Image: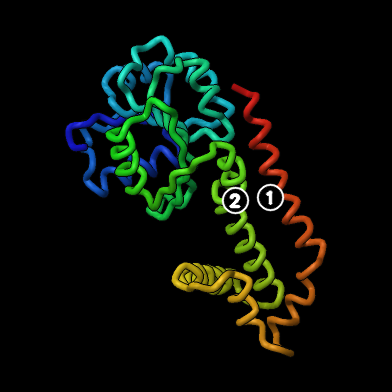
């Protein structure tokens, strides 16, 4: 890929994470890695890039697609991370003859630990797939899907997942402070506990429910906590919240 020019349109968190991953893995030189966060810079990025990665928000991608459709996109690999925006919607604007991959990474790309699930259209060839995998393996792991509709569920789980994780950490820090710990110690305790727990979960062959039960000793402090949580309003609201994220992803199908 060293002689391939990669263009990133939309230089927010995900755009910066992909750029960082590509440079860290030395897949692309700085000279061959172009970014744009302004409409007037898009033309240069599009004209010079063989791979075009669209990292704009789903609410903005319609305008970007209508803008770039005026350019020559033939033989370019176009990658979109816009949640809920289907390949057929992109094809409708840009053309059905183009090479298009839709992918859902997550914020963990910033530390090269994303899980990126993806689907391709029929024009994408083996060379495209090889290059795509190199790009997204630079920020974590990637999984090819057989059904595009799965990306809606995946968006609600792993796409939004880091925010759920951070919120639970936020609540645990708040709880620690309420029972008498200072904020600095509370943050350190929660951060290291979550870090260690995630590594343990990743390395274990057991399901999360089994690991949770293993920590929950009969008559112990953890059991006292889960007597309040299991079947509670908290559990009901959380499950409902994830379903709301899924429904919102479906609604975004109609926005382009």
Residue sitting farthest toward the top = 70
Q: Secondary structure at mark 1?
A: helix
Snapshot quadrant of residue 132: top left
Q: Residue at x 25, y 29 (%)?
A: 5
- Circles 1 and 2, Cβ within 8 Å, touching? The answer is yes
- At 79% from the left and 73% from the top, the residue drawn is 228
Position in image of residue 63 (x %, y %): 53, 18
Q: Which of these two is toward me, 82 or 33?
A: 82
Residue at the disc numbered 1: 242
Q: Which residue is mark 2?
A: 157
Residue drawn at 26 percent across, 49 percent down: 24
Q: Residues within 10 Å of mark 2 (few under 14, many from 20)?
A: some
Q: Secondary structure at mark 2?
A: helix
Q: Nearer the viewer, residue 159 or 208?
A: 208
| Residue 75 to residue 130: above or below | above
- In the rendered image, which quarter is residue 238 located in? bottom right
How far separated are the C-alphas under marks 1 and 2?
7 Å
Upstream in the sequence, badge 1 or badge 2?
A: 2
The image shows residue 25 at horizontal and vertical percentages of: 25, 49
Lateral position of residue 6 relative to residue 68, left or right: left
Residue 18 located left or right of residue 237 = left
Number of labels in the image equals: 2
Q: On the picture, is 179 further left or further right than 79?
A: right
The picture places residue 109, in percent across and down from the top left corner, at 42, 49
Q: Residues within 10 Å of mark 1 (few under 14, many from 20)?
A: some
């Amino acid at each position: 890929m060293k002689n391939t020019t990669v263009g990133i349109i939309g230089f927010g968190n995900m755009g910066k994470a992909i750029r960082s991953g590509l440079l860290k893995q030395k897949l692309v030189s700085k000279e061959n890695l172009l970014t744009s966060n302004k409409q007037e810079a898009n033309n240069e990025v599009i004209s010079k890039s063989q791979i075009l990665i669209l990292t704009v928000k789903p609410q903005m991608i319609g305008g970007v697609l209508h803008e770039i459709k005026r350019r020559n996109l033939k033989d370019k690999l176009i990658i979109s991370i816009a949640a809920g925006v289907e390949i057929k919607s992109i094809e409708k604007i840009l053309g059905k003859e183009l090479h298009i991959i839709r992918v859902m990474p997550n914020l963990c790309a910033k530390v090269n630990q994303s899980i990126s699930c993806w689907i391709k259209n029929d024009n994408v060839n083996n060379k495209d797939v090889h290059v795509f995998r190199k790009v997204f393996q630079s920020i974590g792991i990637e999984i090819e899907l057989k059904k595009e509709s799965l990306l809606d569920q995946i968006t609600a789980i792993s796409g939004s997942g880091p925010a759920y994780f951070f919120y639970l950490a936020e609540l645990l820090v708040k709880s620690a402070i309420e029972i008498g710990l200072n904020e600095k110690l509370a943050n350190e305790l929660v951060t290291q506990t979550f870090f260690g727990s995630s590594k343990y979960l990743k390395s274990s062959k057991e399901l999360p429910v089994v690991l949770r039960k293993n920590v929950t000793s009969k008559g112990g402090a953890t059991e006292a906590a889960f007597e309040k949580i299991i079947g509670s309003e908290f559990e009901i609201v959380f499950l409902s919240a994830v379903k709301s994220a899924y429904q919102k992803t479906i609604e975004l199908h109609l926005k382009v």
